[in-house]
Amino acid sequence: MIKQIVQHSSKLIEFLVLLQLNLSKPQLRHVLRITEGVIVSEAPHKTLARLYDIMVEAPDASNGADFLRISPWSVEEDLRAPQRLFVVEELKRVSEMTGDRVLYVSIDDSLTAKDPGTRHLEPVDVHHDHTKGSKRKPAYTNGTVHVEVRVQLAERAYVFDFALYMREKKVRRLNRKRKKGRRLRFRSKYNLAREILQKLKQLLPPEFIVYVLFDSWYASNRLLKYCHRQGWHVICAIRSNRTLDGIKLSEWNQRFKHQSYTRVALTTTDLRKRQYLVRTRMGRLKNVPFDVCVLISKRHRGDKRPKYFMCTDLTLSAQQILSIYQKRWPIEVDNYYVKQLLGLGDFRVQSYEAAEKWFALVFQAYNFLLWRLHHAPPEANFKTVADVIRTHRQEHARQVLQAACREALHWQDTTPVFQRFLCQFEPVQT
């Protein structure tokens, strides 16, 4: 296999300069190597050994592991806080240029699978997998879970922040072997999401109009009330067993069966037009001290399993509510990219702190791809993050070919060129 990186991308260096990371030069070089490696490498598993092996000049991969494990830097202060500030400053610039003040904040969590035999990596545990299981037959997957918050203003979108989630039982087990100053604190998914939202609130200008979007798993009364206290609106999916004005939503569906529908036309991600039949009801959810609007949405008149949506902005129509809720879908695309193409779950470091640093670097790589997508010239014709990844890899392939040809001309021999540009690892058969 031929090495894929001969020098770092000027675009990536420009992005890191904009972040203004407070790291030493050796630490910044490791940030560059890992960020560049997860984007350029096409290996099915992006381990540190494989990432460092595809670089023409790089230290041993153990140096990268030490950078994550024992190097004296803080992932919160030195990496994540600068990224959050950068994202908000980017949104402010877009707002000033376009005059748009409406910000969409999406919340979701995702399970990244690891090998079933993985037991000694601290963030890895067995989690309930709602995508594979059902109420009657639950499924469980060994892996890591993270909570992500995504922000979008106009056409600009970035990952604002993430947080690793671990079950309370796992946190207690890990803390038995940790010294007092290094013990972990259990936080539920709601608390993790709220902490990230609090950091967002501190950075946002007061004139922004915020809509928080999430699915029914996050539609708790506590999160609804928290967003309401911030002056933010919520649009979310909601379960049929929730009660509106003392009556379950599933019963409201039966009560409305003789009422007319509102037709809502939406464009799906594959650009197909799809029409939904919607009925609307205003009222108050149980233990929620403010009025909300609930939509009962059906694919067709005979649909016996309607979907339920809730909105705290009573001025919006059903068409507007569902159109805004569609903006939650790209967070699922984010999770696909970081897990399938950037190797989010390919870490091999044992401690929770080192794994958190790996996650932060992968999300940094993804934000770089989004930044390059948003700032690309028209002739680049970028439409998706996949286009950016393909172009980024092609640029490196061109640089490697040019460097190999120059060295072959210089030495008049291919042997030293092969020694310099061939990887140690054999290509993996998939």
Image (cartoon, rainbow, N blue to C red):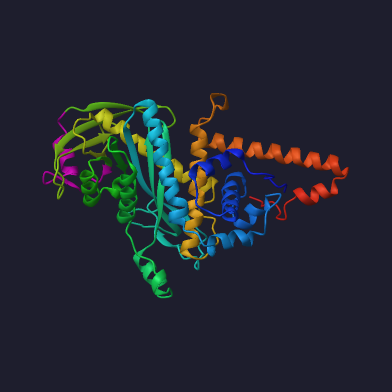
Classify residue 227 by image quadrant.
top left
Q: Is residue 240 magenta?
A: yes
Q: Is residue 323 magenta?
A: no
Residue sitting nearer the eye, 343 or 404: 404
Q: Residue furthest top?
A: 379
For the point 31% across and 46% down, which residue is it?
Answer: 202
Residue 220's spot in the image, x, y percent? Answer: 24, 50
For the point 42% across and 62% down, which residue is it?
Answer: 126
Task: Locate residue 279 relative to residue 177 in the image: left or right.
Answer: left
For the point 24% across and 30% down, which residue is it?
Answer: 318
Segment tinted magenta in the rendering: 237-259
Residue sitting nearer the eye, 237 or 209: 209
Task: Locate residue 395 relative to residue 179 in the image: left or right.
Answer: right
Is residue 154 among what the camera can see?
A: no
Residue sitting nearer the eye, 7 or 370: 7
For the point 54% across and 51% down, which residue is it?
Answer: 343
In the image, residue 48 above or below residue 319: below
Residue 20's spot in the image, x, y percent? Answer: 49, 46
Classify residue 52 by image quadrant.
bottom right
Is residue 414 among what the camera can see?
A: yes
Residue 296's spot in the image, x, y percent? Answer: 22, 36
Residue 285's spot in the image, x, y percent? Answer: 16, 45
Q: Residue furthest left?
A: 246
Task: Locate residue 165 relative to residue 424 in the image: left or right.
Answer: left
Residue sitting nearer the eye, 90 or 3: 90
